[in-house]
Image (cartoon, rainbow, N blue to C red):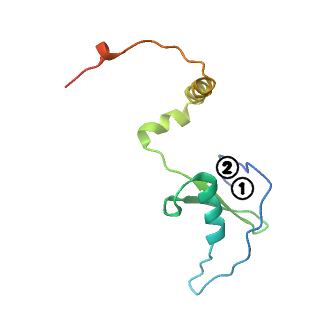
Amino acid sequence: MSSTNTAILDEEFEFYGQTSLDDRKRITLTRAVDALRDLFQEEPAKLRFAIYVNKAGQILLSPETTIPLHEAWLFKNPGALHSVLRGIEQAKAGNLKDLGSFAEDAKED
């Protein structure tokens, strides 16, 4: 793959059928998109893909999402991202600490 930030996350591919190009050089991926909808609980119209081709001619479509620029800093800062993910795991495990109300710190306009 030519992109340095792409990884094959699972090498077990499931066969979903065959297709051919139509007159406009398009292929139908209906069954595969249905599987993605079930896997990610996302509507097909919202799916986006990065497209990769290897030297053997194999095509890999990797589902992607777009994040707002004001949130992108988190994904560019490994330390901060690790901290957030660790906090999420701690919360899932029930490791929470009640810090009380923050109402007095709220600013109302």
Nearer-the-camera pick, 52 or 65: 65
Q: Amino acid at mark 2?
A: Thr
Q: Residue at x 51, y 33 (%)?
A: 74
Disc number lying in front (1 or 2): 2
From this view, report whether residue 94 is shown above or below residue 67. Answer: above
Q: Secondary structure at mark 2?
A: loop
Q: Which residue is mark 2?
A: 6
Q: Amino acid at mark 1?
A: Met
From this view, report whether residue 53 is shown above or below residue 71. Answer: below
Picture coordinates of residue 105 (x, y %)? 31, 15
User: Label 1, label 2: how many angstroms apart (C-alpha)?
Assistant: 7 Å
Q: Which residue is mark 1?
A: 1
Nearer-the-camera pick, 37 or 21: 37
Q: Which disc, if any, is residue 86?
A: none
Q: Residue at x 54, y 55 (%)?
A: 42
Q: Is residue 2 left or right of residue 49?
A: right
Q: Secondary structure at mark 1?
A: loop
Nearer-the-camera pick, 35 or 58: 35
Which numbered disc, 1 or 2, marks the residue that appears first in the sequence?
A: 1
Picture coordinates of residue 64 (x, y %)? 57, 53
CB within 8 Å, label 1 to label 2: yes
Picture coordinates of residue 109 (x, y %)? 19, 25
Q: Based on the displayed image, in which of its 4 quarters is residue 25 positioned? A: bottom right
